Image (cartoon, helix red, strand yellow):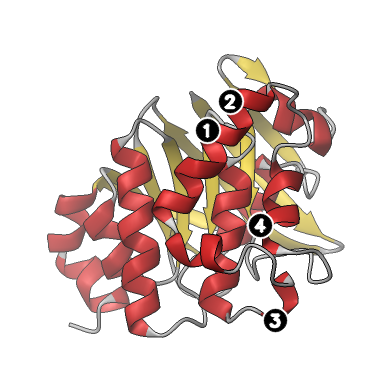
């Protein structure tokens, strides 16, 4: 479904990503792990067209998307849950979720999807009329994921969903991510918590200093002494 070929991303004179290549198959959850500053978010932003690539190609369902506008990418079927959540703080929870469905006009299906999001995140239903800016960090992460699901994406991009959250909230968020994946959602997960990402994904790529250094089945990477020493503290 997604193919990234020899991707370069630069900010001014600084090259954040160098020749990165990765693939994500349909109905697959793939993780991109690495230390802070490794280039993971830059890679995801390039895929989501939030930042122009300096070289290489990005193909979605066989079509290059390197020149497509970010808003058109949503219609193509790619949704990003950004690092830092990016909720609309002065809109209610319900209004934020409605914003996720702004490209759709199938009212009955939208209502069905809203019920589905609330089933995954009952706390959002309890706070449907509450301003998003007054939610806790974990609740805002739930809302950001729910909002992305409301556009019925074919590919869900998740950028650091565990960042800044308490362990119990991280567990809840990843339970839902795993459940969504089991329902058939294709997911590219960027996550600094390598152990957690490798435990929930099928395949993974390790990024260091802007380059992909290791890749393979997540279970194999989780057992790799080099990966364990570098990212799991063992």
Relative vertical location of residue 131 with respect to residue 87 in this rendering, above or below? below
Task: Identify the residue shown where x is 22% and y is 59%.
Answer: 199
Mark 2 secondary-structure assignment: helix
Q: Which residue has dot 3 on it?
A: 134
* Residue in view at x 48 percent, y 23 percent: 1
- Of the image marks 4 and 2, the number of the one nearer the N terminus: 4
Point out the tag, 3 or 4, that comes first from the N-terminus: 4
Callout 3: SS = helix
Please tell me which residue is depicted at 82% across the width and 36% down the height of the picture. 71
* Crowd band around label 4 with a 10 angstrom C-alpha radius: few (<14), some (14–19), many (20+): many
The answer to whether the residues at label 2 and label 1 have Cβ atoms under 8 Å apart is yes
Find disc 2 in the rendering and name its residue. Answer: 109
- Gap between marks 1 and 4, in whole Å? 34 Å
x, y percent for residue 209: 54, 66
Mark-to-mark CA distance, 3 and 1? 26 Å
Tell me the quarter of the picture where residue 57 sits. Answer: top right
Measure the alpha-carbon separation of dots 2 and 1: 5 Å
Locate residue 203, reporting x and y percent. 29, 43
Residue 96 percent coordinates (x, y): 72, 55
Q: Which of 153 and 11 is in front in this view?
A: 153
* Sequence order check, earlier mark of 3 and 1: 1
| Residue 42, numbered label | 4
Using a 10 Å C-alpha cutoff, classify the residue at mark 1 as few (fewer than 14 neighbours), some (14 to 19) or many (20 or more).
few
Q: Is residue 109 above or below residue 10?
A: above
Instruction: Relative to 182, say whether 87 is above or below.
Output: below
Viewer-side residue, 61 vs 13: 61
Left or right of 202? Residue 66 is right
Disc with the residue nearer the chain's start (1 vs 4): 4
The answer to whether residue 129 is visible is yes
């Amino acid at each position: 479904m997604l193919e990234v070929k020899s991707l370069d991303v630069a900010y001014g004179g600084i090259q954040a990503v160098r020749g990165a290549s990765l693939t994500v198959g349909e109905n697959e959850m793939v993780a991109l792990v690495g230390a802070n500053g490794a280039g993971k978010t830059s890679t995801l932003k390039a895929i989501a067209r939030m930042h122009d690539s300096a070289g290489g190609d990005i193909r979605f369902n066989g079509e290059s998307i390197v020149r497509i506008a970010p808003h058109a990418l949503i219609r193509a079927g790619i949704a990003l849950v950004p690092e830092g959540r990016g909720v609309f703080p002065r809109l209610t929870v319900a209004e934020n979720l409605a914003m996720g469905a702004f490209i759709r006009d199938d009212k009955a299906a939208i209502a069905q999807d809203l019920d589905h999001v609330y089933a995954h995140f009952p706390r959002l239903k309890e706070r449907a009329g509450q301003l998003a800016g007054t939610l806790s960090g974990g609740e805002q992460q739930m809302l950001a994921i729910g909002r992305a699901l409301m556009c019925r994406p074919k590919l869900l991009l998740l950028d650091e969903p565990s960042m800044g959250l308490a362990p119990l909230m991280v567990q809840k968020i990843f339970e839902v991510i795993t459940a969504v994946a089991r329902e058939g959602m294709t997911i590219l997960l960027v996550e600094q918590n390598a152990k957690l990402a490798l435990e929930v994904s099928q395949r993974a790529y390790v990024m260091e200093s802007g380059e992909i250094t290791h890749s393979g089945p997540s279970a194999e990477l989780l057992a790799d002494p080099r990966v364990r020493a570098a990212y799991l503290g063992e």
